[in-house]
Image (cartoon, rainbow, N blue to C red):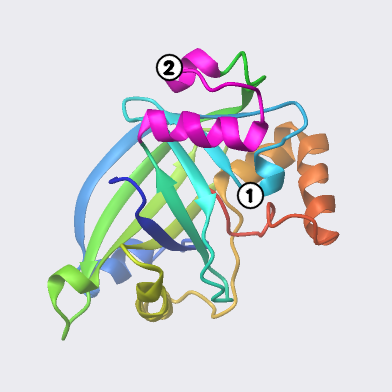
């Protein structure tokens, strides 16, 4: 994904007829893939507690999600996705305040920034593309991903990618419309894979995120967030 694009997404719990519904809507199955995601943070969860998410995807490289600032409320999320390693390193040094920045890739600065693996799991994904009728294809193309993990959790996501903050409300309308056509309850908030992983395998870290979110000191643990 290009540098600095805004991803607007909504996660949901897929049902047994979700793929059938997608087919009836005219969606096209783009691919089925399997990949491993590994997430990194400090032992204090400095990134997650500030709603920043660092991931390395096998075969795809590094991605850093930073919170959007559009202020549109609802059962969705908005993130700026950064995929340039140099830009990721710059932001990591700004966030973690570890002295003079190095000119290096992400892997080379993990130790200095005290970043360590906090989660790693395999996902099998069916990725669908859907163009809403009555609109220009470039403006209406949405992605619907259906994921299942190696630890037994399944989740779906409807996603639109825009270039400007002003485009977010229109993208959100399309996401809500598609979600409704897929039978997703209006206010459903399905937890993301990473949060379910932490809940099951790192419950103390998960509890820290919950407590920070409930205290209002962080947006880190909204239920439908994160990869």
**Mark number, residue 200:** none
Q: Residue furthest bottom?
A: 134
- Spot occupied by residue 218 in the image (x, y as percentages of width and height): 74, 55
Who is closer to the viewer here, 3 or 205?
3
Q: CA distance from mark 2 to mark 1?
A: 24 Å
- Label 1 near label 2: C-beta < 8 Å? no
- Spot occupied by residue 47 in the image (x, y as percentages of width and height): 65, 39
- Residue at the disc numbered 2: 104
Q: Residues within 10 Å of mark 1 (few under 14, many from 20)?
A: many
Residue 48 shown left or right of residue 17 in the figure: right
- Spot occupied by residue 126 in the image (x, y as percentages of width and height): 32, 48
Frontmost of labels 2 and 1 is 2
Q: Residue at x 52, y 37 (%)?
A: 91
Helix, strand or loop status at disc 1: loop
Quadrant in the rendering for residue 221? bottom right
Residue 27 shown left or right of residue 182 in the figure: left
- Spot occupied by residue 97 in the image (x, y as percentages of width and height): 66, 30
Does 107 lie within the magenta span? Answer: yes
Quadrant in the rendering for residue 1? top left
Residue 62 shown left or right of residue 94 in the figure: left
Helix, strand or loop status at disc 2: loop
**Helix, strand or loop for the magenta stretch, by majority:** helix
Q: Residue at x 39, y 38 (%)?
A: 124
- Residue at the disc numbered 1: 51
Who is closer to the viewer here, 93 or 218?
93
Q: Earlier in the sequence, mark 2 or mark 1?
A: 1
Q: Residue at x 23, y 60 (%)?
A: 129
Identify the magenta region: 84-109
Q: Is residue 160 above or below residue 82?
A: below
């Amino acid at each position: 994904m290009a540098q600095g694009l805004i991803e607007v997404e909504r996660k949901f719990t897929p049902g047994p007829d979700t793929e059938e519904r997608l087919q009836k809507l005219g969606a096209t199955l783009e691919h089925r893939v399997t990949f491993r995601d590994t997430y990194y943070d400090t032992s204090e969860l400095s990134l997650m507690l500030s709603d920043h998410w660092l991931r390395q995807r096998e075969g795809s490289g590094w991605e850093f999600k930073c919170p959007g600032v559009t202020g549109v409320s609802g059962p969705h999320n908005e993130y700026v996705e950064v995929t340039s390693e140099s830009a990721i390193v710059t932001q990591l040094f700004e966030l973690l305040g570890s002295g003079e920045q190095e000119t290096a890739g992400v892997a080379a600065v993990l130790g200095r920034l005290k970043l360590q693996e906090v989660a790693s799991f395999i996902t099998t994904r069916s990725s669908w593309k859907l163009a809403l009728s009555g609109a220009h294809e470039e403006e209406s193309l949405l992605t619907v991903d259906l994921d299942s993990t190696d630890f037994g959790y399944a989740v779906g996501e409807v996603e639109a990618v825009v270039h400007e903050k002003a485009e977010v409300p229109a993208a959100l309308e399309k996401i809500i419309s598609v979600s409704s056509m897929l039978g997703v309850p209006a206010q459903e908030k399905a937890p993301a894979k990473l949060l379910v992983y932490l809940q099951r395998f790192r419950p103390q870290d998960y509890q820290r995120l919950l407590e920070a979110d409930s205290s209002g000191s962080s947006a880190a643990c909204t239920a439908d967030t994160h990869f």
